[in-house]
Image (cartoon, rainbow, N blue to C red):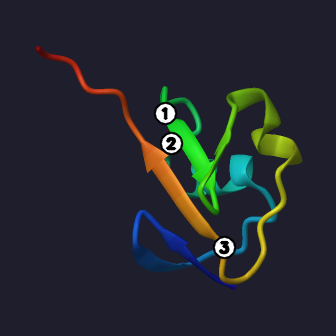
């Protein structure tokens, strides 16, 4: 299925947000995630199903000041 990942079309076979992060090699990374504009906490990613056309944002924290 096709989803939007950080503004780019991405084809995935992942059934949930956790699987998507593993697919893009971010399963162990400290990141923030959102599905269709709603924040998804790390402990809810495995329970958050994906559907065709979903908009996913994955953001890494930035350091600096």
Disc 3 designates what residue? 54
Tell me the residue at 57%/61% (across/down): 56
Where residue 4 sits: x, y (%)? 52, 74
In the picture, the quarter occupied by the C terminus is top left
Please indicate whether residue 48 sits to the left or right of residue 40 in the image: right
Against 18, residue 31 (above or below) is above
Distance in Å between CA atoms under marks 1 and 3: 18 Å
Q: Residue at x 84, y 60 (%)?
A: 49
> Are the two marked residues, 2 and 1, in contact with CB atoms closer than 8 angstroms?
yes
Q: Quadrant of residue 8?
A: bottom left
Camera-nearest residue between 53 and 14: 53
Q: Are marks 3 and 2 in contact (CB under 8 Å)?
A: no
Residue at the farthest front position: 37
Q: Quadrant of residue 13?
A: bottom right
Along the viewing direction, whichever of 53 and 37 lies nearer the viewer: 37
Residue that sits furthest to the top in the current view: 65
Q: Secondary structure at mark 3?
A: loop
Does 1 sit left or right of 62 as displayed? right
Read off the residue under disc 2.
26
Determine whether 62 is above or below 64 in the image. below
C-alpha span from label 3 to label 2:
18 Å
Residue 47: x, y in percent? 88, 45
Position of residue 14 relative to residue 9, above or below, is: above
Query: Residue 31: x, y in percent?
Result: 49, 33
Can you identify the residue that label 1 sits on? 31
The residue depicted at 41 percent of the width and 42 percent of the height is: 59
Alpha carbons under labels 2 and 1: distance apart: 8 Å
Q: Residues within 10 Å of mark 1 (few under 14, many from 20)?
A: some
Residue 5: which disc? none
Q: Bin the neighbour count of mark 2 within 10 Å (Cα to Cα): few under 14, some 14-19, many 20 and up.
A: some
Q: Nearer the viewer, mark 3 or mark 2?
A: 3
Judged by depth in the image, the label closer to the viewer, 2 or 1, is 1
């Amino acid at each position: 299925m096709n989803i939007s990942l950080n503004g780019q079309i991405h084809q995935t076979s992942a059934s949930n947000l956790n699987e998507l992060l593993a697919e893009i090699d971010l399963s162990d990374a400290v990141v923030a995630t959102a599905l269709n504009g709603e924040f998804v906490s790390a402990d809810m990613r495995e329970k958050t199903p994906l559907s065709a056309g979903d908009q996913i944002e994955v953001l890494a924290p930035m350091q600096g000041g």
